[in-house]
Image (cartoon, coloured by chain):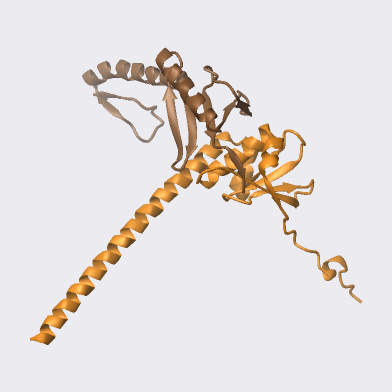
Chain colours: A orange, B brown
Amino acid sequence: MFAQRLISATRHLWRSLAECSRKVQDLRERLGTVEDIREARGISLLREWLSPEQSAQFDASKCFDVVGCDSGRRYRIRHTTGTNVHEIDDAGRPVMGWCFVPSGHLVAGDVMLAQKIALETNERAALAVANRFPVQVPRRTYSDAHPRRAY
Amino acid sequence: MGFDLMPRSSRYKFRFDEILGAHSRPAMLMMSWGLESWRTSMATQIVMDQTGDTRHCFNPDDTEALSKAEERFQSLTSVGCTAAVRDAAGKATVTRSFDPTAEETLFFPRLVGG
């Protein structure tokens, strides 16, 4: 009698747990979809404002270059929401990182668009609020600098 | 008998009833012209937010809608938002005052150091 009740209670518990787990999974999927829609809207808006060259570069490498309106320096904006603006030299190598973002929790596309407009229209003001960070450039090893001779 | 709305080269043809088609074709053309003129006459204010963006469309020929758009511009810029417009070549420009002729104005929040 007791054993039967125990089995029944256990079954009930498992069923409830399975139901809960299914609901959590549904909710997670729904939230994921909402997040995807937000991201897609941000990217769509960004594409509307990119120049054809920037758009092509973004398609190819998920980043695009902008030219600062005050200094004429080039910056590369990468597809994330922070520490994604790198000042680059003529060869396209990063020389310095600049961190500035629009306040609030915006999606990556919106952040990148705000950074692009800021650098292209008011570079000084954008860099005035930005924090600088060093960029890790791949180091040249001794063997790169002095390739071994074939004897 | 019916007529093809699409060119003959098109694989998918939209067939209309002769009588219905005769009446509906001019109506459809008028609707499409109306849509085109609506598209060209509407201006948009795009506000970046947590949902991606929110778009406020308004008719610049409508005085009431225009004053509402100007109010929105003032309230957003007063809290630190930057307003940007694009010229015909697609170049972005920051604007400090409401431009009633701007087709599209983008607002993004104040920039802060990350």
Q: Is residue A30 left or right of residue B105?
A: left
* Residue A140 % position (x, y): 81, 64
Query: Would you identify the image quadrant in which residue A16 lies?
Result: bottom left
Q: Quadrant of the rendered structure where residue A27 is?
A: bottom left
- Which residue is at 31% across, 58% downward? A26
Which residue is depicted at the point 53% across and 27% down? B105
Question: Most extreme residue toward the right, as rendered?
Answer: A151
Residue found 78% across the figure and 47% down from its top? A89
- Image quadrant occupied by the N terminus of chain A: bottom left
Depth check: give the residue in front, A7 or B9. A7
Classify residue B42 by image quadrant. Answer: top left
Q: Is residue A139 above or below residue B86?
A: below
Image quadrant in which the C terminus of chain A is located: bottom right
Q: Is residue A12 left or right of residue A141?
A: left
- Which residue is outermost to the front? B78
Q: Nearer the viewer, residue B14 or A75?
A: A75
Q: Nearer the viewer, residue A39 or A55?
A: A39
The reply to whether residue B62 is in sight is no
Residue A12 position, x and y percent, is 17, 73
B24 sits left or right of A54 in the view: left
Q: Position of residue A108 (x, y in %)?
A: 54, 47
